[in-house]
Image: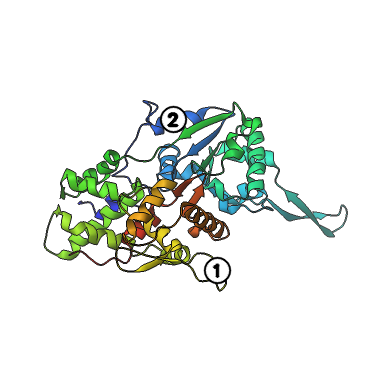
Amino acid sequence: MALKYEDVFRPGSFPEYTYISRKSAVSDLSYEFRLEQAIKVSGFLTSLVGPSKMGKTILCEKVIGLEKIVEVSGADFDENTDFWKLAASKVGLAYEGQFSSEKIIPDTRDKYEKKEVYALTKDKIIEYYKQEKLVMVIDDFHYAPPEKRMQIAQQLKDAIRRGFKAIVVSLPHRADEAIRQNADLSGRLSLINMEAWEVKDLKEIAKIGFAKLDIEIEDDIAEKIAIESLTSPQLMQYICLNICTILELSQSGEKRVCSDILETAYRYTTANFEYGDVVAFLKKGPNPRGKSRKHFKAKDGRSYDLYELIVKSIAENPPIMQLEFEDVQERIVKLLDDDSEKPKAQAIREHLTKLQELINGREDIFRVLDWKEGTLYILDPLFLFYLRWGGKKSAQ
């Protein structure tokens, strides 16, 4: 039976036909081997760190198996969340409750009902995880409140000594200090740093996937898609899936990926991305409180304030997930008309700081940027891709 293209390219689930195994630049061992090795070490907690949308969860599914993973998010925790109550609920265990029992009074026909309250102990929950060979994967650990992260680290320190298996997943420059810098966990950590995907590895997704569908693709076209995928295998899968959709809708019977459909595929890929409000929020910046903002004349003939220029600069070529301050400043200057006044470096820094303060108080979907120690990190490749292609008209 011929494969369907939605079975080959799967951006939201395990890619059975286009899974690519990678090796770390600092090791000749595959990430699969390293994770499997880490899980087998008794009494150790595994810390898996890598950029967003890089396949960290997919790696866990490959090594552990979806049926053995208990997925928890840092966003599941607030200051009052009981770690073990959450651990129990994730596997369907009743953490606390009551039961009734009836007893007959001797030498009579009378009965009485006895109600008892019970609560699972931590030891019983740990034992259940061990018996079922379950592994807790705490994704987006940085979303948990700072104090809660320290409490989770303390709970895990004791649990791993009892045979509890856990993996903490976080972003490379975010708050995993509660794990890595915890003195009590010193010597009990298996550290795995997942590096960003290289173009050569992303290309393999396209080449293998289209080959399985009997669709031709030239190496240089696969490379263009890989570069635009911003180091994200998920985005690469998404774009390839939409290329298949375009070929199918054309009804031409074309079984070849041509460069003239790439921009259309990019636009199609952004169609269901919900970043419009995020972009508008960033461009608007904080409430000016009645003060007028300074505007700068750009080469496209329009005028923009500094918040708008920062957002536009992020979308410029080449697409990069990490920009030093000097890169941001240079991109802003290149956007401006030669005769326009240029914003001062200090003003750009202040605007970046204010943007970060705005983001910190918003929902998870707005946390797409992180301005930290002179570097602007784009946390979500899908956001940057939307910024580059969302709303654009077809070049055809």
Residue labelled with disc 1: 287
Residue sitting nearer the eye, 71 or 332 = 332
The amino acid type of the residue labelled 1 equals Asn
Q: Position of residue 338 (x, y in %)?
A: 31, 59
Residue sitting nearer the eye, 235 or 315 = 315
Residue labelled with disc 2: 34
Residue located at (19% from left, 50% from top): 213
**Dot placed on the residue nearer the N-terminal end, 1 or 2:** 2
Q: Quadrant of residue 128?
A: top right
Q: Secondary structure at mark 1?
A: loop
Q: Report if residue 324 is visible in the image.
A: no
Q: Quadrant of residue 126?
A: top right
The amino acid type of the residue labelled 2 equals Arg
Q: Is residue 152 left or right of residue 330?
A: right
- Image vertical order of residue 164 relative to residue 284, above or below: above
In the rendered image, the quadrant that contains the C terminus is bottom left
Q: Position of residue 81 (x, y in %)?
A: 66, 52
Residue located at (31% from left, 54% from top): 238
Q: Is residue 85 left or right of residue 10?
A: right
Q: Position of residue 313 (x, y in %)?
A: 37, 56
- Residue reaching furthest to the bottom: 290
Label 2 CA crowd tier, 10 Å (few <14, some 14–19, many 20+):
some
Residue sitting nearer the eye, 222 or 353 = 353
- Image vertical order of residue 264 relative to residue 38, above or below: below
Q: Report if residue 293 is visible in the image.
A: yes
Q: Secondary structure at mark 2?
A: helix
